[in-house]
Image (tube, rainbow, N blue to C red):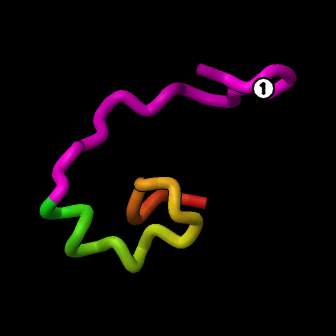
Amino acid sequence: MVAPGFVCLGTPVTDFTVDNDLYNANSDSDRDGDGIACEKH
C-alpha cells in the first residue's frame, strides 16, 4: 500500500529476507522503529 500523494521512484525491492532472529540481532539498526533493520536511507 502506498500513501496518497506518495511517489515511488526506482525499482521496488523484491529480494528482502524476513528472519526474526536476524532482526533481533540487528534491532539497534532499526533507527525509525518500523521493523526493518539495516535499511538504506
Residue 17 lies left or right of residue 40; in this view the side is: left
| Location of residue 22 in the rendering, given as x and y in whole percent from the top left corner | 17, 63
| Residue located 43% across and 32% down the image | 13
Picture quadrant of residue 6: top right
Please tell me whether the stretch drawn in magenta is mainly helix, strand or loop: loop
Answer above or below: position of 35 versus 27: above
| Location of residue 19 in the rendering, given as x and y in whole percent from the top left corner | 17, 51
| Location of residue 35 in the rendering, given as x and y in whole percent from the top left corner | 42, 55
Picture quadrant of residue 11: top right
| Residue located 22% across and 44% down the image | 18
Q: Residue furthest right?
A: 5
Residue 22 lies left or right of residue 32; in this view the side is: left
Residue 6 lies left or right of residue 35; in this view the side is: right
Q: How many badges with numbers are in the image?
A: 1
Q: Nearer the viewer, residue 32 or 11?
A: 32
| Location of residue 24 in the rendering, given as x and y in whole percent from the top left corner | 23, 69
Q: Amino acid at mark 1?
A: Val
Which residue is labeled 1 in the image? 7
Look at the image and say whether residue 19 sits in the magenta stretch: yes
Q: Which residues are magenta?
A: 1-20
| Residue located 40% across and 65% down the image | 38
Task: State the SS at label 1.
Answer: loop
Answer above or below: position of 23 versus 11: below
User: Tag 1: Cα neighbours inside 10 Å, few (<14), some, or many (≥20)?
Assistant: few
Q: Split into 4 quadrants, where in the image is the N terminus?
A: top right
Look at the image and say whether residue 24 sits in the magenta stretch: no
| Residue located 25% across and 62% down the image | 23
Residue 14 lies left or right of residue 17; in this view the side is: right
Q: Split into 4 quadrants, where in the image is the C terminus?
A: bottom right
